[in-house]
Amino acid sequence: MSKSAELAALIRNRAGDEAPEFGLILGSGLGHLSERIDGTAIPYSDLPGFPHAGVSGHVPQLVIGQLEGRRVAVFGGRSHYYESGRADAMRLPLEVLAALGCDRLILTNAAGSLRADIPPGGLMLLNDHIAFAGTNPLIGEPTDARFVPMTDAHDLGLRQALAAAAAAEGVDLPEGVYCWFSGPSFETPAEIRAARVLGADAVGMSTVPEIILGRFLGLRCAAISVITNMGAGLSDESISHDHTKAMAPLGATKLEAVLRRFLREG
Ligand code: HPA
């Protein structure tokens, strides 16, 4: 049995057989939604091969249960490329999600904005991305399945449902392009200017490898950024991980309202 099939069996034993309809991956400062699900929490430490999610602001547990009447699998934390140098750090968790029978993935992250009209505290729905980190989670994958088309990486149907949920909640949800930097250092002002020239609207250190892996595994994907700061050099505020964690809850309240409405009606 493959490792993902083994882990899926272990999870079914503890959380029941019903397949999750949605997988949710929660970003920095956003992991606490996983604590509000009516279901079974499984610490990553019980799931051999799952990342230890060593970044503060993440909650390293998988919760399977009901949120707004939908069966969800919520990952309270993720592993980033910058933690291990491995862009495929989230491959096993996503393989397990697919092995559980789930086919839709919603990702969230904290990000820096490049647009004055998307200020800190706001949200941005990703309509595309730029993999600027210079690597790919499918490097080393030996099969032809590695040649994943990325044209529909950000699923139109999911985006429309998220946009409708945001409108119904009265939450502003502009769309934009997310540029993946490796981190862990933040960008320089020159890198932020370069990202703008390339067509980015926000920058961050996650999500893109998971979307690539998600598409590889046949999952429909969509992602929302919680904007915690303006990109380096675009404002006088300081940029730090503490600032990210302090600002994330501002957007997280709106994000939770959008996600709950999306699940109820999507
Ligand atoms: N850059 C990269 N990642 C981030 C930022 C940023 O400005 N803010 C939150 N995550």
Image (cartoon, rainbow, N blue to C red):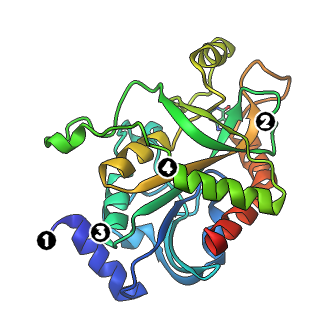
Residue 54 visible in the picture: no
CB of mark 2 within 8 Å of CB of mark 3? no
Label 1 crowding class (10 Å Cα cut-off): few <14, some 14-19, many 20+? few
Task: Provide the residue designation for mark 1.
Answer: 1
Image quadrant holding the N terminus, namely bottom left
Amino acid under label 4? Asp
Residue 206 locus on image (x, y percent):
52, 41
Name which of mark 2 and mark 1 comes first in the sequence: 1
Mark 2 vs mark 1: give the one in front: 2
Task: Provide the residue designation for mark 2.
Answer: 118
Task: Provide the residue designation for mark 3.
Answer: 99
Q: Secondary structure at mark 2?
A: loop
Label 4 crowding class (10 Å Cα cut-off): few <14, some 14-19, many 20+? many
Q: Secondary structure at mark 3?
A: helix
Task: Kindly identify the residue that appears in the image at 42 percent across and 41 percent down.
Answer: 209
Image quadrant holding the C terminus, namely bottom right
